[in-house]
Amino acid sequence: VTIRRLLIANRGEIAVRVIRACRELGISTVAVYSAADADARHVREADAAVAIGPASARESYLNIDRIIAAARETGSDAVHPGYGFLSERAPFARACEEAGLIFVGPPASALEKMGSKIGARALMRGAKVPVVPGEAPPDQSDKALSEAATRVGYPILVKPSAGGGGIGMKAAQSAADLPDALNAARREAKASFGDDTLYLERLIERPRHVEIQVFADTHGNTMHLFERECSAQRRHQKTIEESPCMALSAAVRGRMGAAAVAAAQAVGYRNAGTCEFLLEGSGDDARFYFLEMNTRLQVEHPVTEAVVGVDLVHAQLRVAGGEPLPFAQGLISQRGHAIECRIYAEDPARQFLPQAGTILLYHEPRGPGIRVDSGVGQGSVVSVHYDPLLAKLIVSAETRDAARRRAIIALRNFAVLGIRTNIPFLLQLLDHPDFVNASIDTGFLDREASAIAAAAPTELPAAATAALEFHRTDGTRHHAPGTPGTPGTFGTDPFQSLKGFRV
Amino acid sequence: VSDVRPLGDGWYLVTEGGRQWRVAIAGDTTATWVFVDGQVMRIEAPTGRDRPPGKGRGDGGVMSPMPASVVAIRTAVGQTVNEGDTVILLEAMKMELPIRAPRSGRVTALHCAKGDLVQPGVNLLEIE
């Protein structure tokens, strides 16, 4: 590979994922971190690390000047933006280009074209890619937006034009709900993207969210790597993703793939990207509408890696360095089934409130067909400053049902103590009849999440009580990583208790 | 009758009714956590030493359920609020979290300001 030293402008599991890929390709890595992340896993795993500011993302992971300076100081020749933070910001890609750094992603011009939902839709119409009815009035007053909403038709979705990841997206069922939706969307858009331009879109009811992974190199190749089904989302935050999508016939899959490639070509796309579509219906009669393009690596990229048998981060690094794509359209296929479960620090029993705290005990499942991408470990402090994704469990097997069962067994062996996670919720979801039948739409979790959360067992097996009794009465501190009443101790870890230990 | 064998690092092998369970236990000053078979239980520590004195739940106080930052304050000292009114808007992990008045009354004190990072279990404002 051309790249010699890569700075990762991100944190958490994706930073760890990129560091691993670099290690395999012989690229040295530079982590950046905020004051809240000095002890984070991505910092420990990189070859070098640079502090870039206080905990607030705005002053650290979103600080373009500071990150470019860190790249310069460390002699980096490339920057990987991960997802979220600066990954889809054209000014950041441009700043990298101007500083002579390779931006591992699309050119700034493609980010600009796809970053504006308004411009992207116009371009997609031109490229004959079907889009959902919607508009973004140049006059952004409440009055003009409300008139536009009436033209588009209710129910309607209010979205930040500069947004992504569901942040700031608000639904209005009727004109009466619109003012609240506009205010909330504006506020979140301003806070998250620094731009409160809003976009109104017809809400297609009971659709599936199906996205196509695309990849383009600098040698004129643009291809797709099939679909991911991401309908299991709560308040636009994805929870479970899988591939293949059971509602896609071969014919529709082919047309969606071609549409995604056309979309990428229309903006001169390069590197990895994803075209999101809404799918109405199933089988050969299904219709799909282009939603938006995510101009970055996705959280759920391992699902594609599992069914297609590729390494998307390796490919990103090669293509960014000027090499041709390491795979070709005619030579790839989908094999078996993969499911990703996102492990969030949130409490399903209390309206999925994000949780903060210290992870006292952490154990990931292992076994055939099981992969865990995580950004935390035992002792990690989960703070309130960043998004609550702790880890991703990706399982693959011959069939969807085998993958589903494998995911359940793996989650039953995924121990996270000290902070609530959504693992008990995921276990219920994977066993829900509608999930088992692959018949869920994007509104499913918004309708059913509370009922699914409430179905989780509230009592532990009697074995737990027996272990607890033993733990309390018998030499507790010799066996447990933490002991009630002794602040901050981590029991038996010799590297914490041995004094003057030399290697 | 059950048999418990410590496996180290907080793990226990429990044999009960001919079946084996792997149980994990960890704790800190506030609680003990137990894991078995994908389910987690949190048991509050019996002592309340870690709680700030005089700042407990109830008595007209309004608290954040989690660490969060204050985005907006929708009331002021002396103002009358109705039960269910959003009095404070918090934000945590990119999500807005409206804090509503638990009952109607007059706001007698405000313990936070816009931009503050607030902790759970601490009163944000008081309603008389």
Image: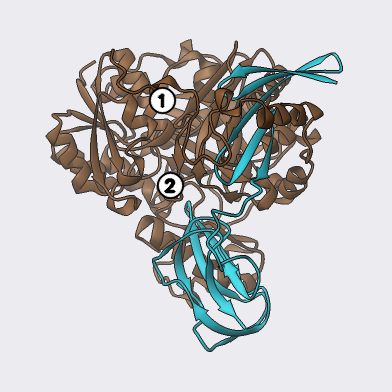
Chain colours: A brown, B cyan
Q: Residue at x 53, y 64 (%)?
A: B122
Residue B100: horizontal and vertical position, in percent? 61, 71
**Left or right: where A3 falls relative to A240:** left
Q: Pointer 1 indicates a residue of which chain?
A: A
Which of pointers 2 and 1 indicates the residue nearer the eye? Answer: 1
Q: Which residue is mark 1?
A: A497
Does any portion of residue A460 appear in the rendered image?
A: yes
Question: Please, what secondary structure does the residue beneath circle 2 have?
Answer: loop
* Foreground of the two, A326 or A253: A326
Q: Work out which quarter of the rendered image holds the C terminus of chain A and state it.
A: top left
Instruction: State which tag comes first along the sequence, 2 or 1.
Output: 2
Query: Which chain's residue wears label 2?
Result: A
Q: Quadrant of residue A419?
A: top right
Q: Tell me the kind of residue under disc 2.
A: Tyr
Residue in the picture at 35% in, 35% down? A39
Figure quadrant of the N terminus of chain A: top left
Q: Position of residue A124 (x, y in %)?
A: 44, 44
Mark 2: give few (<14), some (14-19) or many (20+) Cα within 10 Å: some
The amino acid type, in three-letter code, at marker 1 is Ser
Q: Nearer the viewer, residue A180 or B73?
A: B73
**Mark 2 — residue?**
A386
Residue A137: percent from left, percent from top: 44, 66
Taking the image as shown, residue A247 lies to the left or right of residue A302, namely: right
Residue A216, visible in the rendered structure: no
Distance from Cα at disc 2 to Cα at disc 1: 31 Å
Q: Nearer the viewer, residue A274 or A257?
A: A274
Residue depicted at x 40% and y 14% = A327
Measuring from the top left, give residue A30's x and y in whole percent. 24, 29
Dot 1 falls on a residue whose secondary structure is helix
Left of A132 or right of it: where is A441?
right
Mark 1 crowd level (few <14, some 14–19, many ≥20, 10 Å Cα): few
